[in-house]
Image: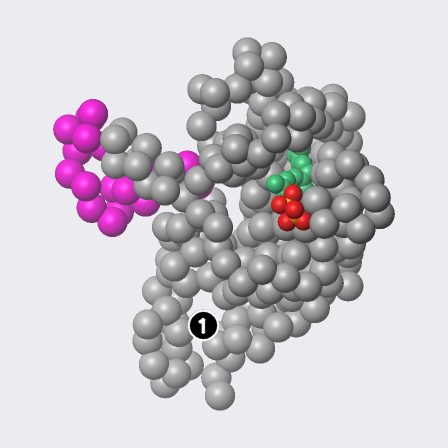
Amino acid sequence: MATTTPIVPKHVAIVMDGNGRWATKRYLPRIAGHKQGVDALNRCVRACLERGIAVLTVFAFSSENWNRPSDEVSGLMDLLLLSLSREVSSLSGNGVRLHFVGDRLRFSEKVQRGLMQAERSTAANQRLVLNICFNYGGRWDIAQAAQKLASQGEAITELSLDRAMALAHVPDPDLLIRTGGELRISNFLLWQLAYSELYFSDKLWPEFDDSELDAAIAVFRTRERRFGQTSAQVAGPDNNPNSKVA
Ligand code: FPP
């Protein structure tokens, strides 16, 4: 079987699920699991840098997470600001460019300012793009892109929508990882995951480590990516119809 899959995926997307269960198992409040989740995210960013992955996109807060208990929601907002104040300079030193993806209008001014400053201060970095999806939903993204085009009087086509989506600055994910044992997409990157390879892990997100990332990459390497073509076609020249490039 012809294998055209590159050694390392260019863009990895992750649903970081399982923080709450990690905490509950230890008789800790759920927010303790989210704090461990930040540590796991830091480790994962380092591992992506070491492996030459160019884009990492993570689901940190979904449009539906507002429905959680208010102390968990405010705890996640505080954790976001605390993580920014602690991590941005070291992320920047490592060449990481931060993007926050999602609807910012519902955030406090303080949070909105924090996100903007983090993006500005890392804007020149080129080693790794880290997209943090916060108040994000795949359906929201498709709707906001369509609305943008409609308000500009532009025709809605696959290409114009693609360019109006919140992740237009990066190619589509090659590999989606979901931790926590659930087998669903949960309104993440509905448009962009059309041809991504999927990897589901039973590990809870705070337990995610380099070896689990390597296991996902190893499985990714075994996949033949056909993008709707036949095996014979992908074995030939011009074998990547997914040509959207950052
Ligand atoms: C899903 O686990 C995880 C979340 C809703 C939050 C993810 C957040 C982090 C990893 C850390 C925060 C990141 C930043 C940048 C502040 P869950 O709570 O649904 O876990 P469960 O399924 O075990 O209940």
Number of callouts: 1
What amino acid is at disc 1? Arg
Q: Quadrant of residue 229?
A: bottom left
Judge by depth and name the residue closer to the eye, 28 or 126. 28
Residue 221 visible in the snapshot? yes
Q: Classify the position of ligand 1 by quadrant: top left, top right, bottom left or bottom right.
A: top right
151 in the magenta segment: yes
Q: Is residue 31 above or below residue 223?
A: above
Q: Residue at x 52, y 33 (%)?
A: 67
Q: Quadrant of residue 92?
A: top right
Q: Residues within 10 Å of mark 1 (few under 14, many from 20)?
A: many
Relative to 70, is 241 on the left or the right? Answer: left
Q: Quadrant of residue 207?
A: bottom right
215 in the magenta segment: no
Residue 185 x/y as whole percent:
48, 55
**Residue found at the far right of this picture:** 26
Residue 12 x/y as whole percent:
57, 54
Residue 205 x/y as whole percent:
71, 51
Relative to 62, is 215 on the left or the right? Answer: right
Residue under numbered circle 1: 225
Residue 42 visible in the snapshot? no
Q: Residue at x 41, y 63 (%)?
A: 195
Judge by depth and name the residue closer to the eye, 20 or 81. 20
**Residue found at the far bottom of this picture:** 1
- Label 1's element? loop
> Which region shows up in magenta?
149-167
Residue 55 x/y as whole percent:
57, 47
For the C terminus, the quadrant is top left
